[in-house]
């Protein structure tokens, strides 16, 4: 018996104290991991926004980019789509995700929320929470707190069972409860309940006994006991936690911005992201997380927030498809390497900030044991380079809006505005777009049953709120009624709705359609209608496009034609002839094709194809075609130009909502792009926008794991608004042109393609400032010697490195020594 008892005791000890476990503590300077103060560079990768097959590659690229940790939210509505019915499969396999992080030898940051914001449907909260009586979201009340605790405990227990916390030998070193509550606390009109709630959150979290610290972000006031508060934002250098015994941590440094259907694409320059990170570490930062490091895709209808595009690319260092985005990725990697080399002095050294001339120029000197020193010089002027002379009498030019890092206080090893890494231009192949032409068949969505008011789930003498009525099980809700009319008549049908989209039918005929403009919610539709003698039917189809995810009481924002009014107005006098708001309305959630799972292409569906001809620009139409998957391993996109609005599936996998007919706004920021100056995503002063006046989202990611090689693949579309699928096409996305610059002789110039593709030609090797952009440099001042050196080293190779040499010369009059190279992959 004795050996077995010993074994049992050993096992008990292992679980209690964590054999091979990592101890996570903290002090005023840093997280202390197994007794060592550590700089942690982390990046957000949201597991449902990619596929399990993509995770190892994304995580490996993050590690190679100099990251120590991967951070993710937990997505409650995805894990518990119906109360107590759970989903931990596929891209919701959270344990598998954390195991991949562990296998890569990285740390993980677990942000449970479970309110997560995240441009995610309803901020991650399941819509069924609304049905529980007495429910008040994110306030001190039993119904909410009980559900939140049940879910939080479930997640923690699942991760504990898989030994995922640091003390158990797992990767998780930090965990977060709630999210950005400090932003809304004061706006809830019940500050006592709000305060009790956030303290309850802390107590509930600490009771979970996860063995790692709990954090709250953007919770600068009323920070509960046992919680470390952290910063979110584009810049966090001037922010410090209130408590002086905790480290300065930045949980969301926005690397770009998300995209809404009405907006062009946001781009935050590599120079500006690097500037913000360098300043953060200059001013005692110790942990920072890129939000996002890989943004990914909002697959499926409950993934995206209101009016958020299916692409959640975010202009992150890894693009939506998992490709390395250069120069952002490489420029930040260079910064990470420098910061890591300074870990000891930054976290143990004494420090002194000296402002020079005015507050915009700061020199920070870290010293350790009087023997070593490290310096940062930051210049926050947005238009003025400055010369800074250090103690040793040497003057350094610090460009406007940049930070220079001198790990020995003598030599500048990094300047945030000087990019040494390559710039890549991604191309879609084949570039001429001539791939296989697809043969389509089609099927109408059967609207007939909804064109009279005979059939419906139930009736009510009022206009109901949509989320509650449909349980958010579909985007669509039918509202139908009828009225008697004597003789014929002409009216304006007036509908007031809280969004997000509306189609109106009178006696079976589509008479009007509208959607919320500019991401708003409430709108009115007015459309002329003819009525006939006798009974007339009005059928209104309301559709949601992702539920609101942010703001005080965001969950109270209704959807659909709640309360209306719905009226028939006399066009001559503008007076209401019929107010139908309190008529008997019949309700039905979802479309027939959804209930029949038309997207799964099951047997028994009535697909039609008359010699390959299909109707186009026909609303409420299902389309189907087969195609061959593009060969190779490069990411695949579907070009959906020509379609209106709807949903696409590949082999039954949801690609998300598509809406290429939505044209992105033209904004001031489309015509200016200077990395210098504060980056913004809202209000005045936007810059570096692209895609203005173009289809808001034309290309849709088709993960490789959705495709089958060597056999037919099926694409199914539900086209709601009317479009032409005959232009639908598939492409791969990879590096097309690779460019790099070297300012000084001796600099190494590295070029690389992707996915095993090799450099086919070197197109430009110029001395002097090249005109044009990477992919289309105009050249001038060509150096034959440089061209020859690059051709010899690079052509036929996946990557190459060439040293900028003194004998790289151009014609007389070309005095610049700045070498610019462009190659084609
Ligand atoms: C709540 O607000 C009231 C009035 O604004 C204020 O007097 C009170 O101190 C606040 N209480 C808390 C806990 O913040
Ligand atoms: C560092 O220098 C200061 C002043 O010159 C001196 O007081 C201190 O003892 C020195 N510390 C070490 C560790 O040498
Ligand atoms: C500091 O720089 C900002 C631009 O970043 C500028 O608006 C401001 O005037 C500068 N302050 C001083 C004192 O020069
Ligand atoms: C910095 O110094 C260089 C050379 O010493 C000089 O040419 C330049 O004008 C100076 N720049 C500023 C902003 O003072
Ligand atoms: C439309 O509905 C909203 C939300 O119910 C309401 O606030 C607004 O007053 C209504 N507007 C009109 C013009 O009826
Ligand atoms: C009725 O309202 C419309 C706008 O809603 C307006 O253009 C029209 O002039 C109005 N007609 C009358 C008779 O008031
Ligand atoms: C509809 O019913 C509501 C609630 O009973 C009432 O406030 C409203 O005045 C009614 N509207 C009409 C047009 O009868
Ligand atoms: C379909 O094609 C067949 C054979 O090519 C032809 O006989 C028939 O007339 C076509 N039907 C239509 C509707 O075009
Ligand atoms: C959207 C959002 O929360 N923006 C905030 C980000 O943080 C900065 C400061 O850290 C605020 O000024 C923004 O309002």
Image (cartoon, helix red, strand yellow):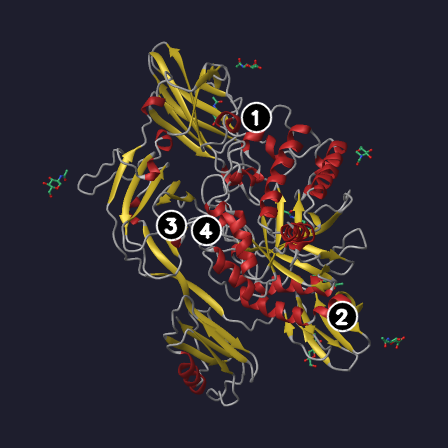
- Identified at 44% across, 87% down, the residue is 785
Query: Quadrant of residue 345 in the image?
Result: bottom right
Which of pointers 2 and 1 indicates the residue nearer the eye? 1
Residue 188 to residue 401: above or below: above
> Is ligand 9 less than 8 Å from the beta carbon at label 3?
no
Residue 69: percent from left, percent from top: 61, 58
Residue 1 to residue 790: above or below: above
Q: Secondary structure at mark 3?
A: helix
Query: Quadrant of residue 384 in the image?
Result: bottom right
Which residue is tagged 4? 51
Q: As drawn, is 44 to the left or to the right of 485?
A: right
Residue 349 to residue 245: above or below: below
Residue 200: percent from left, percent from top: 73, 37
> Is ligand 4 less than 8 Å from the beta carbon at label 2?
no
| Cα gap from disc 2 to disc 1, whole angstroms | 57 Å
Q: Which mark is residue 363?
A: 2
Which residue is tagged 3? 706
| Cα gap from disc 2 to disc 4, whole angstroms | 45 Å
Earlier in the chain: of badge 2 and badge 1, it is: 1
Q: How many marks?
A: 4
Circle 4: is it few (<14), some (14-19), or many (20+) Cα within 10 Å?
many
Evaluate whether residue 73 shows in this view: yes
Check contact, mark 4 vs mark 3: CB within 8 A: yes
Q: Which mark is residue 244?
A: none
Q: Secondary structure at mark 1?
A: helix
Earlier in the chain: of badge 1 and badge 3, it is: 1
Q: Quadrant of ligand 3?
A: bottom right
């Amino acid at each position: 018996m004795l050996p077995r008892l010993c074994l049992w005791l050993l096992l008990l000890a292992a679980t209690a104290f964590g054999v091979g476990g990592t101890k996570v503590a903290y002090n005023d300077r840093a997280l202390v991991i197994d007794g060592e103060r550590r700089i942690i560079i982390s990046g957000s990768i949201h597991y449902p926004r990619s596929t399990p097959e993509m995770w190892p590659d994304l995580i490996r690229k993050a590690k190679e980019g100099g990251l120590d940790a991967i951070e993710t939210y937990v997505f409650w509505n995805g894990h518990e789509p119906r109360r107590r019915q759970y989903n931990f499969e596929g891209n919701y396999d959270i344990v598998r995700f954390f195991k991949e992080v562990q296998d890569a030898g990285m740390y993980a940051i677990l942000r449970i929320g479970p309110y997560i914001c995240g441009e995610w449907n309803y901020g991650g909260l399941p819509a069924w929470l609304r049905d529980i009586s007495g429910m008040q979201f994110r306030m001190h009340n039993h119904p909410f707190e009980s559900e939140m605790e049940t879910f939080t405990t479930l997640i923690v227990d699942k991760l504990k069972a898989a030994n995922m916390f640091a003390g158990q030998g797992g990767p998780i070193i930090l965990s977060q409860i709630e999210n950005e509550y400090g932003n809304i606390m004061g706006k809830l009109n019940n500050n006592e309940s709000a305060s009790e709630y956030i303290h309850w959150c802390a107590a509930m979290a600490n009771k979970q006994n996860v063995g790692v610290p709990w954090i709250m972000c953007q919770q600068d006031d009323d920070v509960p006991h046992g919680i470390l508060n952290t910063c979110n934002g584009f810049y966090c250098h001037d922010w410090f936690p209130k408590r002086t015994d905790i480290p300065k941590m930045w949980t969301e440094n926005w690397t770009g911005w998300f995209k809404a259907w009405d907006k062009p694409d946001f781009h935050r320059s590599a120079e500006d992201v690097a500037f913000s990170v360098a300043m953060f570490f200059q001013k005692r930062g110790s942990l920072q997380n890129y939000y996002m490091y890989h943004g990914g895709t909002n697959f499926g209808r409950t993934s995206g927030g209101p009016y958020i595009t299916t692409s959640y690319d975010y202009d992150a260092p890894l693009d939506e498809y998992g490709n390395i985005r250069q120069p952002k990725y490489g420029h930040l990697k260079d910064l990470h390497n420098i910061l890591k080399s300074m870990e000891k002095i930054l976290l143990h050294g004494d420090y002194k900030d000296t402002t020079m001339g005015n507050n915009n120029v700061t020199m920070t000197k870290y010293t350790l044991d009087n023997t070593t020193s490290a310096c940062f010089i930051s210049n926050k002027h947005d238009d003025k380079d400055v010369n800074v002379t250090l103690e040793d009498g040497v003057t350094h030019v610090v460009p406007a809006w940049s930070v220079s890092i001198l790990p020995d206080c003598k030599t500048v090893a990094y300047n945030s505005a000087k990019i040494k890494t390559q710039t890549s231009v991604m191309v879609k192949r084949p570039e001429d777009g001539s791939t296989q032409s697809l043969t389509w068949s089609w099927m109408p969505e059967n609207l007939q049953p909804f064109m009279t008011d005979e059939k419906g789930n139930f009736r009510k003498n009022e206009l109901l709120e949509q989320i509650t009525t449909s349980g958010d099980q579909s985007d669509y809700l039918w509202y139908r009624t009828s009225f008697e009319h004597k003789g014929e008549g002409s009216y304006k049908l007036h509908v007031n709705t809280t969004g997000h989209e509306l189609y109106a039918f009178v006696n079976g005929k589509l008479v009007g359609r509208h959607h919320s403009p500019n991401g708003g919610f409430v709108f009115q539709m007015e459309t002329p209608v003819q009525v006939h003698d006798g009974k007339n039917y009005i059928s209104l189809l309301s559709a949601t496009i992702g539920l609101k995810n942010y703001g005080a009481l965001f969950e109270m924002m209704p959807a659909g034609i709640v309360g209306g009014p719905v009226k028939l107005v006399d066009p001559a006098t503008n007076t209401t002839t019929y107010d139908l708001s309190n008529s008997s309305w019949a309700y039905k959630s979802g479309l027939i094709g959804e209930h029949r799972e038309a997207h799964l292409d099951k047997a028994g569906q009535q697909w039609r194809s008359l010699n390959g001809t299909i109707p186009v620009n026909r609303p409420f139409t299902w389309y189907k075609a087969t195609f061959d998957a593009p060969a190779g391993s490069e990411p695949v996109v579907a070009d959906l130009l020509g379609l209106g609005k709807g949903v696409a599936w590949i082999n039954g996998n949801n690609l998300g909502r598509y809406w290429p007919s939505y044209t992105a706004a033209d904004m001031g920021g489309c015509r200016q792009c200077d990395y210098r100056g504060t980056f913004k995503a809202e209000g005045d002063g936007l810059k570096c926008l692209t895609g203005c006046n173009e289809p808001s989202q034309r290309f849709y990611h088709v993960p490789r794991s959705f495709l089958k090689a060597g056999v037919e693949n099926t694409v199914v579309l539900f086209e709601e608004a009317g479009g032409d699928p005959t232009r639908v096409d598939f492409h791969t996305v990879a590096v097309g042109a690779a460019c790099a610059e070297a300012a000084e002789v001796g600099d190494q110039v590295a070029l690389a393609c992707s996915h095993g593709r090799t450099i086919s030609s070197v197109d430009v090797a110029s001395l002097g400032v090249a005109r044009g952009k990477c992919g289309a440099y105009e050249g001038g001042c060509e150096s034959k010697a440089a061209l020859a050196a690059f051709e010899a080293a690079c052509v036929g190779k996946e990557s190459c490195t060439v040293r900028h040499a003194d004998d790289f010369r151009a014609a007389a009059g070309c005095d610049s020594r700045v070498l610019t190279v462009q190659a084609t992959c």
